[in-house]
Image (cartoon, rainbow, N blue to C red):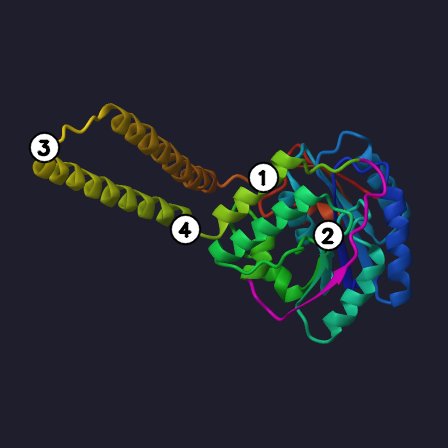
Amino acid sequence: MPHPQLTVVVPCFDECEVIDAFHSALVAALEPTGEPFEICYVDDGSGDGTADRLRALAASSPYVRYTSFSRNFGKEAALLAGMRMARGDAVVLMDADLQHPPELVPRMLELHRHGYDQVVARRDRTGEGAVRSALSRAYYRVVRHFMEVELADGDGDFRLLSRRAVEAVLSLPESNRFSKGLFSWIGFPTAGFAYRNVERAAGSSKWGGRRLLDYGIDGLLSFNTRPLRLAIHTGLWLFLSALGYAAWIVVNAVLNGVETPGYATLITAIVGLSGVQLATLGVIGEYVGRIYHEAKRRPHYVVAESDASASRHADGVPTTAAAQSRPRR
């Protein structure tokens, strides 16, 4: 097989129902380009037979490679594993549920040929619920105000990266990874285009409200320390407010001789200050927890199985003894 000019990285989690349709659509979109390509699938600990389907695809197609995790490590780990596997001069990241239309990949390649190191496909909000759409827009407004990197509304993992952009991302050592932020942080010339939102071809979304909330918090904390600075500002504001209120009580008592009742004021102050303290401790705890995870320096994932050509790219540390490499049949 010639050296691939294009690698498509596809993280999968319980996508057995749609993986064959996705693979057929992707190959149909790539073959007319005439570029040598490979497809790197990463099974993120699926429990529905996805690994069996990937094994069969790798056995029947010389341009398919796969890695299967020992358990579910999350999409960030799967993207990292796929980029480590990738050998192409350009690398496209996309989901297997057909919400990232494969027919857009040739357009990405065309923009890449014009000198762009990153090409981002941004979905619109067509068909999305009003509440979710409003929350998403509000989140991106907050992100643009607080984070140290620029994220556009609709930016996702569906993008093309040049080889030097991939190497830049892989050189970043952190364990708590927020890929959208990392892609923006590395810079390089970037182009983007919008596409119409597409429903899943089969199955259900793995991203419920709680996971989206946690992911949003990860993004906010990964690329700025402003929550800590906000805690300092809040503390100073409360201190100055309390000092001013105390001065007002003293002056009022001296001038008017009024005995100021204090029970309601005291309870209100205690409850308010306690809430601020707990919130501040929570913010500090999040940062300390991230330092704790970074200090342990655990690998991002553990490989349970991979085809022969993918095993040596499995992780930045030696593959564990539990990992097995199955040669092609």
The verdict on residue 303 being magenta is no
Secondary structure predominantly adopted by residues drawn in magenta: loop
Asked if residue 177 is positioned above or below residue 48 in the image, the reply reads below
Q: Earlier in the sequence, mark 4 or mark 1?
A: 1
Q: Earlier in the sequence, mark 2 or mark 3?
A: 2
Q: Amino acid at mark 1?
A: Leu
Residue 152 picture quarter: bottom right
In the image, the segment drawn in magenta is 186-203
User: From mark 2 to mark 1, how far is it between C-alphas?
Assistant: 18 Å
Q: Earlier in the sequence, mark 2 or mark 4?
A: 2
- Residue 207: give x, y in percent of width and height: 68, 38
Q: Which residue is mark 4?
A: 226
Q: Which residue is mark 2?
A: 125
Q: Amino acid at mark 2?
A: Arg
Query: Regarding mark 3 in the picture, which secondary structure is present there?
Result: loop
- Disc 2 crowd rating (10 Å Cα; few below 14, some 14-19, many 20+) is some
Q: Are marks 2 and 4 in contact (CB under 8 Å)?
A: no
Q: Earlier in the sequence, mark 2 or mark 1?
A: 2
Q: Is residue 5 left or right of residue 116?
A: right
Disc assigned to residue 213: 1
User: From mark 2 to mark 4, how far is it between C-alphas?
Assistant: 29 Å
Q: Which residue is mark 3?
A: 257
Q: Are marks 2 and 1 in contact (CB under 8 Å)?
A: no
Q: Amino acid at mark 3?
A: Gly
Q: Are marks 4 and 3 in contact (CB under 8 Å)?
A: no
User: From mark 2 to mark 3, how far is it between C-alphas?
Assistant: 63 Å
Query: Regarding mark 2 in the picture, which secondary structure is present there?
Result: loop
